[in-house]
Amino acid sequence: MFIFICLCLWSLPGVSGVDVVKSESESVMEGDSVTLRTDVTEILKHEEIDWRFGKILIANINMKENKSTLYNTSATEIFRNRLKLDQTGSLIIMNTRTTDSGEYKVTSISRDTPLITFNLTVYAHLPVPVISRNCSSSSSAQNCSLACSVVNVVHVTLSWYKGNSLLSSISVSDLSISLSLPLEVKHQEKNSYRCVINNPIRNQTTHLDISKLCHTCAELCICCCGSTEAVIRLALSALVGVATFSVLICDFRSKNLQQKKSVQTSASDTD
């Protein structure tokens, strides 16, 4: 019985000399605050500990003497005026940025071992998906080709939904890129479609208005060609109009000048 009791005490957290390693994951949206909680004060109250971001030393806490230090060095410049420590040794990061993502460690100085590790992910704000007409040659009188697009995104999934049913999706993890997801619908159909971008915390949704985007070529000829080509055509039309107007003005002035010369010549002959 005595041996059994001793073994139980040795395995309990909070007993001096026990290395307690706890690993947690935290996620937050950019701009929000997050608290990385130690929650092991019984162990830490007799410890001097360091907070590290990767290999960067960002804070030191002497729990026994109730002293704490936040380091302001070139290595910690990314956290300027955005860190706080509370009475339990927990670290508070304010106005978070995506560059704050990474591993944070609480390390015991006396034992030189990690007590707690946190994996923090800070997600960037989500853009609103943009739905546009894809006026390609593949479009027909019955079908309307569309595309849902977002730019400069990371750690997101872009999806098309018909009602509550998922039709298609595309994801990006580590690289910041632009995403575009096609969809083809009938011109006159009444189904509800939406394009959704989401990360593990939030989402943004744009609903499709078929009546506005899916005109036929006869109704909206400018859509039958690419937007760039349409702009070029409009510009050329404007130039032709200006040139025609200039020619008419020059012709009118030339005729007036000829008439004046004729009048002057007739007057000279009379004299």
Image (spheres, rainbow, N blue to C red):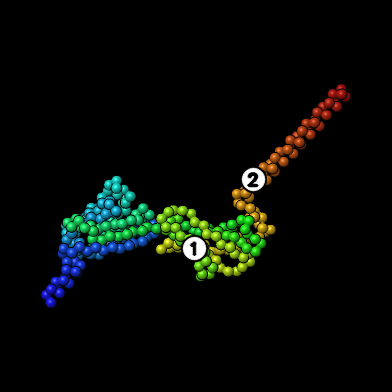
Q: Residues within 10 Å of mark 1 (few under 14, many from 20)?
A: some
The mark found on residue 169 in the picture is: 1
| Sequence-wise first label, 1 or 2 | 1
Q: Residues within 10 Å of mark 2 (few under 14, many from 20)?
A: few
Picture coordinates of residue 32, whole percent (x, y): 37, 58
Q: Nearer the viewer, residue 141 or 219?
A: 141
Give the quadrant of residue 116.
Answer: bottom left
In-image side of 225 versus 126 (left or right):
right
Residue at image coords 55%, 60%: 182
Q: Amino acid at mark 2?
A: Ala
Q: Which residue is mark 2?
A: 235
Residue at image coords 17%, 56%: 110
Q: Quadrant of the C terminus?
A: top right
* Res. 66 in view: no
Instruction: Look at the numbered disc 1 and give the secondary structure of its residue.
Output: strand
Residue at image coords 59%, 57%: 134
Q: Amino acid at mark 1?
A: Ser
